């Protein structure tokens, strides 16, 4: 027997879609910011700028990891919703 206590599976699916979109948007925006930063900084070569760029690169890596985690969790939630709906439909 499947222990299911979800008020509204539609809300859960909406949340999964939200996480997927958020993860994609974050990754795209920070990749775009990184590309812009590289273009703007081509002629700027001082120590402070290099430090900032290195830190920003590390931040972009972290943002992309968070984005991937959100996308995986979104897929997990979607699979769970599918299983729950299938279970409920077979019990009716």
Image: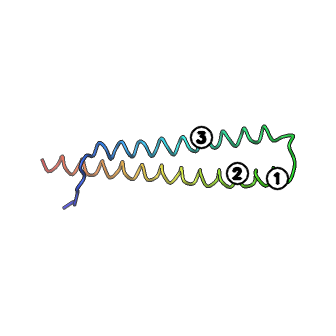
In depth, the one of 81 and 15 nearer the eye is: 15
The residue where tag 1 is placed is 48
Q: Which residue is mark 3?
A: 28
Q: Residue shown at 54%/53% (left/top)?
A: 66
Kindly indicate the quadrant of the structure image that contains residue 40: top right
Mark 1 to mark 3: distance in Å? 26 Å
Q: Looking at the picture, does residue 10 appear above or below residue 1?
A: above
| Between discs 1 and 3, the one toward the N terminus | 3
Between disc 1 and disc 3, the foreground one is: 1
Q: Residues within 10 Å of mark 1 (few under 14, many from 20)?
A: few
Q: Could you tell which of marks 3 and 2 lies nearer the N-terminus?
A: 3
From the top left corner, tell me how far across and down residue 3 is, in percent. Answer: 22, 60
What is the x, y in percent for residue 2? 22, 60
Mark 2 or mark 1, whichever is nearer to me: 1
Q: Badge 2, how many Cα within 10 Å: few under 14, some, many 20+?
A: some
**2 or 1: tag closer to the N-terminus:** 1
Residue 41, image quadrant: top right
SS category of the residue bearing label 2 = helix
Nearer-the-camera pick, 52 or 76? 52
Q: Which residue is mark 2?
A: 56
In the rendered image, residue 32, in percent from the top left (x then y), is placed at: 66, 39
Looking at the image, residue 29 sits to the left or right of residue 87; the answer is right
* Quadrant containing the N terminus in the rendered view: bottom left
């Amino acid at each position: 027997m499947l222990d299911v206590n979800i008020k509204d599976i539609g809300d859960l699916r909406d949340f999964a879609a939200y996480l997927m979109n958020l993860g994609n948007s974050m990754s795209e925006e920070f990749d775009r910011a990184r590309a812009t930063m590289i273009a703007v900084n081509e002629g700027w070569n001082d120590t402070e700028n290099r430090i900032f760029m290195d830190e920003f690169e590390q931040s972009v890596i972290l943002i992309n990891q968070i984005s991937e985690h959100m996308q995986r969790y979104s897929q997990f939630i979607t699979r769970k919703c599918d299983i729950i709906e299938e279970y409920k439909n077979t019990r009716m």
